[in-house]
Amino acid sequence: MNAATRAVVRSALARGWDVLGVHHGYSGLIEGDLRPLSLRAVGGIIQLAGTFLGTTRCEMLRTEAGRARALATLKDHDIAALLIIGGNGSQTGAFDLYRHGAPVVGIASTIDNDLYGTEVSLGATTAVDVALQAINQLRATASSMTRAFLVEVMGRNCGYLALMAGIAGGAEAILVPETETDPEQLAQELSAAYDRGKSHAIAVVAEGAKYNSEALIRHFREHRARLGFELRATCLGHVQRGGAPGVFDRMLGTLLGAAAVDAVSDGQFGVLVGMSGGKPSRTPLEQVAGRARPADLQLLKLARVLAM
Ligand code: F6P
């Protein structure tokens, strides 16, 4: 998000426009917390996780009163374009503001990577890298102690993070929300890995899977006296949102930020700027709002072959 903000600010200033930063997301828009951004204000941030502007989950934007105050802020500050960096919730809010007359352009950003209108969203690959580092480190204990591990990753109702981390991390099993996996089937998959001579068994579990790591541990505690191996669970949680952006995310943020300024310059509003076919693209927010793109299940088939 910082790379995108930096690119927006510098591209817009290069065109001679004034730029204000909205602090704390939609709450700041409702409260009128807008402050000028200079070239220097966005210096030294491209390598930082999170967003230096701050952000919130804002329930008030869903109310008529909240939306009216947000629209009033835009009017009071004579705002010609509002760029919104975020995932499903943010882009659904963006579409709502656009329908009520706000000149909005969205920038695709979510570790869940479940937005329509883009092949990849800001933050997703960095979040996978964080999960991979954890899996690498857990494997050391798993191998040394012949233990099995469940590693729970975020992703809300999408299995993208689990699939990527599972395949790139060499997991023996992957559980995603898009398919149902029974705990007994998982136990068999992990046992089979030991039977094939492996010294460890790692399952990557999406938080939105029918059985998350907590439910699986509970199930095994209640229904199986002995699995035949020791099982531990690690829930990565918000750690995944704090990774320093790698080159891919820094470039993605830069390209999407600059492309969003191009959209404003072309007078094209009500669109999400994302990546399609390796190039910045514009998709009507109408096609993006209120929807979540599922993970590619072909990859799950491949993962099963590779886990052998
Ligand atoms: O949408 C991004 C995400 O990190 C999801 O993966 C996760 O389910 C959710 O946000 C967590 O939200 P919060 O930080 O509000 O608990």
Image (spheres, rainbow, N blue to C red):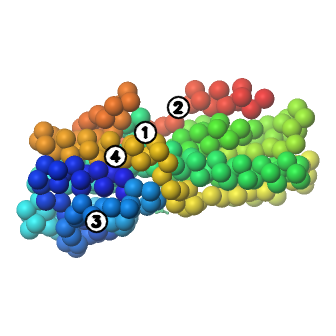
Residue 273: percent from left, percent from top: 29, 41
For the residues labelled 1 and 3, the Cα–Cα distance comes to 27 Å
First of labels 4, 3 by sequence position = 3
Residue 157: percent from left, percent from top: 51, 47
Amino acid at the residue labelled 2: Asp
Q: Residue at x 80, y 51 (%)?
A: 140
Q: Can you say which quadrant of the picture contains the N terminus?
A: bottom left
- Label 1 secondary element: loop
Q: Can you say which quadrant of the picture contains the C terminus?
A: top right
- Label 3 secondary element: helix
- Is disc 1 in contact with disc 2, using a CB cutoff of under 8 Å? no
First of labels 2, 4 by sequence position = 4
Residue 261 vertical position relative to residue 41 in the rendered view, above or below: above
Circle 4 crowding by C-alpha within 10 Å: few under 14, some 14–19, many from 20: many
- Is disc 2 in contact with disc 4, using a CB cutoff of under 8 Å? no
Amino acid at the residue labelled 3: Ala
| Residue that label 2 marks | 296
- Label 2 secondary element: loop
Circle 2 crowding by C-alpha within 10 Å: few under 14, some 14–19, many from 20: few
Residue 16: percent from left, percent from top: 11, 53
| Image mark for residue 166 | none
The quarter of the picture where residue 56 lies is bottom left
First of labels 1, 2 by sequence position = 1
| Image mark for residue 254 | 4
The quarter of the picture where residue 120 lies is top left
Out of 109 and 207, give the one closest to the viewer: 109
For the question of whether residue 13 can be seen, the reply is yes
| Residue that label 3 marks | 41
